[in-house]
Amino acid sequence: MKKVVLAAWALSAACAFAQGSPGGLCERCGTVENVHQENRKGQASGVGVVGGAVIGGLLGNQIGKGGGRAVATVGGAVAGGYAGNEIEKSANRRTVWVTQVRMRDGSVRRFEHAARPGWRAGQVVRLNGKGNAIVQLRPRAAPSA
């Protein structure tokens, strides 16, 4: 635990020291512009398609006579499969937190998180070594008078 705290402090100090660099931020540091929630449709496993097709086919079979019944059955199965797939995606919907970070070079990066992140707009954060995750930095202390 002490190593993690020490590493976070060292990282914070390094980025604070780099404030004199062009753009006022270290190489992998950026300023959080926005943190907000977004809804994502879930993944469909195929269960919704199969279930919807069976129900749609059964309902379509109840309509028409002769050759019309076959067309109604196929049409019902297709429509039911599509509807079942969409219902399954909606049922598996999830909410993600999106952080937009303006990097030193002016580009904006987006990161998604399953839970609310611990930073807010205006805070300086640093990307991890691979650039695919954010490491929060401690806010810089105000200069003493």
Image (cartoon, rainbow, N blue to C red):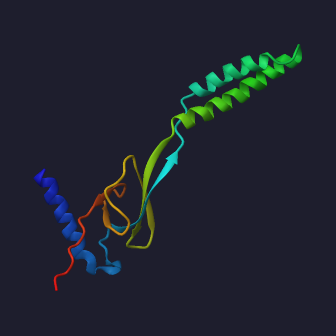
**Picture quadrant where residue 60 is located:** top right
At horizontal 52% and vertical 36% (from top left) the residue drawn is: 43
Q: Which residue lies furthest to the left in this view?
A: 2
How many numbered callouts? 0
At horizontal 35% and vertical 58% (from top left) the residue drawn is: 131
**Picture quadrant where residue 33 is located:** bottom left
Front position in the image: 35 or 78: 35
What is the x, y in percent for residue 28? 32, 66
Q: Say above or below: 117 vs 61.
A: below
What is the x, y in percent for residue 40? 52, 45
Q: Is residue 54 left or right of residue 30?
A: right
At horizontal 23% and vertical 65% (from top left) the residue drawn is: 138
Q: Say above or below: 139 vs 94.
A: below
**Picture quadrant where residue 89 is located:** top right
Q: Which residue lies furthest to the front in this view?
A: 145
Q: Is residue 41 left or right of residue 66?
A: left
What is the x, y in percent for residue 58? 72, 17
Q: Say above or below: 137 vs 143.
A: above
What is the x, y in percent for residue 97? 42, 52
Front position in the image: 128 or 143: 143
Q: Which residue lies furthest to the top in this view?
A: 66
Q: In this view, does 94 lie to the left or right of 3?
A: right
Picture quarter with the C terminus = bottom left
Q: Say above or below: 40 vs 54.
A: below
